[in-house]
Amino acid sequence: IGFLSQSPSSESSRFITVWHYRAGQYVARKGEPERALHLVCRGAVLVTAIDESGKEAGLHLVGVGEFLNATDLFLEHQTYSRSAACLGDAVVTTVSWEALHDRMQSSPSLAASLLRQVASQMRLLEERHRQLQCRATSARTIQALLRMVDMCASRETKDVVLPFRLKRSVLARLVGASRETVSRVLADLLARGLIRQSGHRLIIPDPARLEQAARGSNRP
């Protein structure tokens, strides 16, 4: 974001910290105190919450250039309202909320840029909610895979290798289905040549074709 590039490095080092995470590590845990804005600089982070049955449910994925907790900070929450764990190795930059708040007051363009980013992420969340309500599990699974493609390549790219090990349990939490159901969907996609497996890595040979399959399976 502009705030990171506009501040002199000597000044920035006092309120900007770069964190490196391994796959599976938590960037944030619900209930822990928070006083910094988190920006994903590399990798993908899964935001989760505890559902009514007490199980951890995936809410959405946060990719490069997106914020983890902007809504919490703007609403002046003192603790994280959600947990967030890395799908693979990741780099996350934190910016002191006090320093960012001061900078926004003196830079309306920065404040507007942050609000646009937050609005864009909220639009994605609204679309995900609509998918959970209206789409079949197969379509939701495909859309989750396409979201991961968007994080590392364009949908016109061929043979996209997801840059992290995608566990069935993680994908199941993300699409709101059981692990067994998601495994059946993935087996069907493998049989149709829409995805490939190479070791622990998942490959999307043709994202555009996979997107077409999502439209065809969009039945409740």
Image (spheres, rainbow, N blue to C red):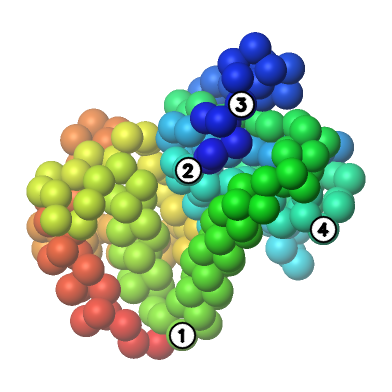
Residue 73 appears in the figure = yes
Q: Which residue is mark 3?
A: 7
Q: Nearer the viewer, mark 1 or mark 4?
A: 4
Report how far apart the C-alphas of labels 2 and 3 lie in the structure: 18 Å
- Tell which circle, 1 or 4, labels the residue nearer the N-terminal end: 4
61 over 28 or under it: above or below: below
Q: Amino acid at mark 1?
A: Cys
What residue sits right under mark 4 in the picture? 75
* Residue 13 at x, y percent in the picture: 66, 16
Q: Amino acid at mark 4?
A: Leu
Query: Mark 2 highlights which residue?
Result: 65
Instruction: Check residue 134 in the rendering and tell me which mark sits there, or answer none.
Output: 1
* Residue located 41% across and 81% down the image: 135
Task: Check whether the beta carbons of the residues at disc 1 and disc 4 lie within 8 A of each other.
Answer: no
Q: Is residue 39 above or below residue 145?
A: above
Query: How much space separates mark 2 and mark 1, taking CA atoms?
Result: 29 Å
Observer-side mark, 2 or 1, equals 2
| Nearer the observer, 209 or 105 | 105
